Image (cartoon, grey):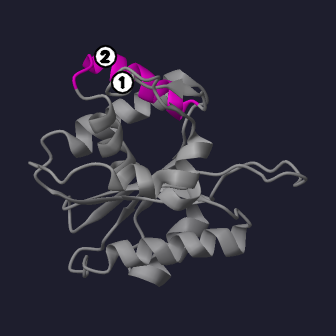
Amino acid sequence: MLFMTLTTAPGGDRRPLAYDVKRLLQRIERELGFKGLVHYMVQTLEGNGVAHLILGWGRGPGERPSEFWIPQRWLSEMWLEIHGARVVDVRAVRQGRVGWNGLARYLIGQYVAGQEGMVRLSWSWRRLFGFPLVQVWKWWRYWYRGRPFREMVRAWDELMAGGEVHGPPAEGGGGGLTVSLASIRKGWRSFASSVPPEGA
């Protein structure tokens, strides 16, 4: 995983920032060979418009091992060509829970919690999960309604770690549904459609 920051030049136009990030990611895949790149982006109004990205990549079956790294100089030249700004930063995220949790806390503290300058969040949900995470999370909350919040979050963490989760007992006393990431990928539309609209 990498943590990347992309800026807009002083006096530059920040409006195409999200589109230009998409173009950059396509170029990284094509020119550096990191096919299947996944991302999570927080776009803010810092400076003249900044994008903070977490990038993830893993080699596919049968592919030769390759280090996931984007050279700073190459990145700066590509971003200047695409967006007209040269100031970029890229750094590796330490492997393991300590590094990942540290990055999550940093992003939430700096760019999500109470951030008035945040413009948008985006992520590659099709590649990463195969289903829209926000819609499935709404279904999950509805599914666990009336149950302890900690129980709901613990089960969600287990699901996100790749486990099978036995849900709460069905209404009427029947056994709860068992779900996994694979079953949600296949049936997320029916899960999402079973949640009544907000306030209903």
CB-based contact (under 8 Å), mark 2 and mark 1: yes
Please, is residue 130 above or below residue 93 in the view? below
In the depicted view, which residue is nearer to us: 187 or 129? Answer: 187
Residue indicated by mark 2? 150
- Residue 150: x and y in percent read 31, 16
| Left or right side of 42 for 126 | right
Question: Callout 1, which amino acid?
Answer: Val
Residue visible at 35% across and 17% down in the picture = 151
Residue indicated by mark 1? 153
Please, is residue 120 above or below residue 54 in the view? below
Q: Give the extent of the magenta segment.
A: 146-161
- Count of all numbered marks drawn on residues in the image: 2
- Residue 114: x and y in percent read 12, 41
Is the stretch drawn in magenta largely helix, strand or loop? helix
For the question of whether residue 4 can be seen, the reply is no
- The question of residue 154 being in magenta is answered with yes
* SS at mark 2 in the image: helix
